[in-house]
Image (tube, rainbow, N blue to C red):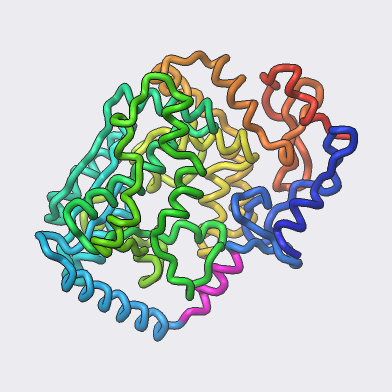
Amino acid sequence: MTGDFLLENRYHYLNNKVIYKYLMKYCKKCVYPMISVNLILDDEGICSACRLQEEFDMLTEEFWEQRRKKFIELTRWAKSKSTGNYDCVIPVSGGKDSYFQVHKVLEYGLKPLLVTYHGNNYLPEGQRNLDRMREKLNVDHIVFGPSIEILKKLNRGCFEIMGDMNWHAHAGIKTYPMHIAVKFNIPLVVWGEITWTISGMFSANDFVEYNKRTVFEHDMRGFTTKDMLERIKGLTHKDLVWLTMPSDKEFEETQTKGIYVGNFFKWDPNIHAQEMKKNYGFEFASQPFARTYRTMSNLDDMHENGIHDYLKYIKFGYGRATDHASKDIRSGYLTREEGLEMVRKYDHIRPQDDLNRWLKYVRMTEEQFDHIADSFRDHRVWWVKDGKWWKNNLWGDCSAYEDVKLEKDKISKYIRQ
């Protein structure tokens, strides 16, 4: 049974009203809902990400030794193609994965140039981690930060357009480092975790590389600078030139390629975080997050684990705690029952302090925020009853959550029969 089949048969229309045939389904092994992007459930009710983890768990030491040798081949290729001071670019946010990427590249003898896209919302611990890299790892580091006013316009505008105030950050970290690589004729760009393992889109044998299509479809959500210029007032092309990709001709002339370290070495963020803390003084968050139990992730943007993640919950009915718990269940750090309790505790929380900070940052009222946010709710997840938003829960029942702030003329598609 394919994901498409499940989606098509979860609901159908009668007289323009949604008639639901199936409840919201969850993976029986982790805690992911079927609504997760690019995820499918098989006939046994197990999600594609869990199946991919099973595939990875069966890989032998001999397999990883062969992958290590392929990485060595790539390092030799990069050195042979390098014509300047650097063999590779490493896009870094200062997080645990960034440290691990640099650690591995140095271990295998490459001379890296670190490149950071700075979105102006670092947590104090995150900023210290970023600053520490240059000293502790003895590397050169370029930090690019767009104008604060431009960032505020993009925060507010992208929230209004797509319900994602951090679009600029997801896009910027994938576009700007490639400009640096092309400009300085650096042959290799080294990323960390294979982005799409979270949904199980590719197998271990696919050797996924960085490419413009997935940046456009995944990181940029199908939007381009053209959309920003047309729909956000006060922006010019020169303001957003860093958000465009190098041309195909430029990539061809420089032969620059992007790879993922996760294709060549076992990837376990829990182990990496502890190793980077021990070896380089990497800091975890000093205060717990409102919406997840992990304190080692997303320190480069205070809103990632806060209001940005809350918007994902508003749209799709799950949040960062579901992401983290699902990964930790697959890796054996949590049981499914423990993961379920993390979801029950965190996923629905409204991060009021973080929201207040962001509203002040972009000059928006909370009432405006709620009206816009409600317009992005997925009607396959949420329905309206008695003035409340309802959804099916991971633990088997359904619950009412927040008051409906949507305009009355837009509520009809959320009424279930």
**In the rendered image, the vertical position of residue 342 relative to residue 315, given as above or below:** below
Q: Tell which residue pokes out farthest to the front in this image.
A: 249
Determine the residue positioned at 41% across, 58% down: 211
- The foreground one among 70 and 150 is 150
Measured from the top left, where is residue 88 in percent x and y?
21, 61
| Majority SS type along the magenta span | helix
Quarter of the N terminus within the rendering? bottom right
Q: Is 89 on the left or on the right of 336, as rendered? A: left
Q: Is 267 on the left or on the right of 410, as rendered? A: left
* Whether residue 238 is visible: yes
**In the rendered image, the vertical position of residue 339 relative to residue 305, given as above or below:** below
Is residue 53 covered in magenta?
A: yes
Measured from the top left, where is residue 304 in percent x and y?
44, 38
- The foreground one among 185 and 95 is 185
The magenta segment: 50-59
Quarter of the C terminus within the rendering? top right
Determine the residue positioned at 58% across, 62% down: 49
* Whether residue 285 is visible: no
Q: Tell which residue pokes out farthest to the bottom in this image.
A: 62
